Image (tube, helix red, strand yellow):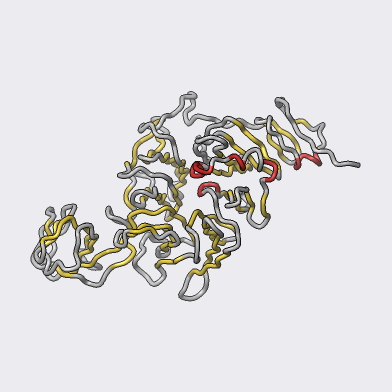
Amino acid sequence: MAKTSFGIFSNPIKGVIKNVPSLLLNEAVTPDSDKVVLTDGEIHRRPMRSYYLTKNDAAVVTPDGNPVMNLVPYIKESTNTLYLLVLTKKHIYHWNTTASALDEKYELATDADTWDYCIFNDKVVLTPNSDLPLVWGGTGSVTPLDTPYGVRVSYSTEVTTVDAESAASQKVLNVAATTGLEAGDVIIIDKGNANEEVGKVNTVQAGVSVTLVDNLSITHAATEKIYICTCITKAKFAKEYYSRLIIAYPYLDQDARWYAQGLYISALNDEDFVSGSEVGYFGIGQRGKIKGFGYYNSILYIFKDRGKVQFFPVAGTEYFNYNEIPDSFGLLAMHSVVNDDKGNLYYLASDNTIKQEGVGTISAPIQTEILDKIQPDHLDKVRGAYVRDYKEMMWALPVESNENNYVVVYKDGVWLLMKDVNISCFCDYYV
């Protein structure tokens, strides 16, 4: 008997429809049915999602008027508290459930063109790609991850010492010599001792002193040693892996350049990137820029624009190693990488198909009409998510548009299309 494909092109009714050839449902494509879901071989009416954070159906507008670029659901385990951060190109907001309003937590000095984040040490670490790496622990303001001048990753040898007592609450630091010190340098005074303090040089008076950007908070005595710090002042990615924080694709102030294949690894359960033998820098692979990250079978996948790298822990003093897979597909869109509840890894690959790691291309039914029409100049707007309540993979896409206007949903081998749905990002959050 010839095999017959089956599709649904009508409005759903409430309840369960069972008088259909369920054996063929996994081959069904239902482009006109945006309110149904396939569950255990049966078609059910889709539980509709709320478009509002408030219960009175009032839309929440960001105070700065900018579109939402990312949503960050954050459960602080020590207090079992759920938070939601809302990220725009200019601000970080916290959703205040009591006031039903967005509270400003941070204003960027330079507009973000993308955001990344991870949960580490019961805190949220955020990288806006245009400003300092940031951290928030659920109360108070968002703050720089390490210092107001960047994340320290190394120190120079001693460059000079304090020459005469330099009082707190002033910006002038008396030094024995100024050779090697320049405006913009981040310095550390009395490193590892009671008077340790980090500052940034504003101006240099040759052979006499340096004037700092901010006042000293400690009075420094003569002979205290001074070192120059190398700091990450911008970064594209923040990830947690085996209880360590990874800052990837960093910009280093001392070199004034991006490290497109680089990542820094912190100490165990600590945001410290300079203390301990295990911390350090990895140059990942021989070609291509880091484009994104994913997790699969306890391995950290580092996607490049060409190919990908498997990053994993090893025994001994090396702690981590990596395996480059240069002939594999790279990543097309940073925020398309998603894991489902079984740990399967999905992503929009460099050949413009959606792939499941270990399986291959899964997007053939939507390739011609959807994926081939994504605007290449707006791939940064692609967003993926896994919705646990419905066990569905979802991607918002800019199809023949400058903004996201389609949502494609994948579950159990079936694709569902939602047209004219403008979603800049989405996440799981329980109101």
> Which residue is farthest bottom?
316
Which quadrant of the view contains residue 273? Answer: bottom left
Q: Is residue 201 left or right of residue 112?
A: left
Question: Which residue is pictured at 71% across the width and 33% down the height?
Answer: 44
Q: How many marks?
A: 0
Whole-percent x and y of residue 232?
Answer: 34, 58
Task: Say if 31 sits above or below 117 in the image.
Answer: above
The residue positioned 16% from the left and 58% from the top of the image is 218
Seen at 31% across and 56% down, the residue is 150
Image spot of residue 300 (x, y percent): 53, 60
The residue sitting at 54% across, 30% down in the picture is: 50
Tell me the quadrant of the picture where the N terminus can be found.
top right
Residue 104 x %, y %:
34, 37
Does residue 159 sit above or below 120 in this rendering? Answer: below
Residue 384 located left or right of residue 147: right
Q: Position of residue 32 (x, y in %)?
A: 68, 30
Q: Quadrant of residue 182 in the image? A: bottom left
